[in-house]
Amino acid sequence: MKATGTCPKCLCTALWYVEYVANNDPNPGTQNKATQFQLAVTGKLGLDGTSGRLEAYACQQCGYVELYLKERLPVDGKHIRELRRPQGPPYRG
Ligand SMILES: [Zn+2]
């Protein structure tokens, strides 16, 4: 949807772009809460310890939503782990 400008579900081309996905925490008064939705929380809670700000594309017709990371994630092996498909020829079943 981000690259094509077209909804992959219904092929509608009228989309909404959401630059900052809000954190819909019902208790936003706590100082340690990020105001933006984060994909992951690494280390301590708070702005220093969060990572993975998101942007969203939403279809105006069917409501389908795609989220994209706006930044690279720091792999800490606990909260965020890197996965890579093993090298080699493609599987043939
Ligand atoms: Zn759609």
Image: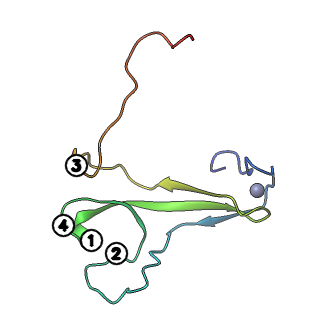
Mark 3–mark 4 Cα distance, whole angstroms, equals: 13 Å
Q: Which residue is mark 3?
A: 78
Q: Which residue is mark 2?
A: 34
What residue is at 33 percent from the left and 90 percent from the top? Answer: 29
**Mark number displayed over residue 47:** 1
Going from N to C along the chain, the mark reached first, 2 or 1, is: 2
Secondary structure type for disc 3: loop
Residue 57, percent from left and from top: 62, 59
Mark 1–mark 3 Cα distance, whole angstroms, equals: 18 Å
Mark 2–mark 1 Cα distance, whole angstroms, equals: 6 Å
Secondary structure type for disc 1: helix
Q: Quadrant of ligand 1?
A: bottom right
Secondary structure type for disc 2: loop
Q: Are marks 2 and 1 in contact (CB under 8 Å)?
A: yes
Image quadrant of residue 18?
Answer: bottom right
Image quadrant of residue 85?
Answer: top left
Dot in front, 1 or 4? 4
Mark 1–mark 4 Cα distance, whole angstroms, equals: 9 Å
How would you rate the neighbour count of disc 3 (Cα within 10 Å): few for under 14, some for 14-19, many for 20 or more?
few
Residue 59, percent from left and from top: 72, 61
Q: Are marks 3 and 2 in contact (CB under 8 Å)?
A: no
The amino acid sitting under disc 1 is Leu
Residue 20, percent from left and from top: 49, 69
Q: Are marks 1 and 4 in contact (CB under 8 Å)?
A: no
Going from N to C along the chain, the mark reached first, 3 or 4, is: 4
Mark 2–mark 4 Cα distance, whole angstroms, equals: 12 Å
What residue is at 43 percent from the left and 69 percent from the top? Answer: 37
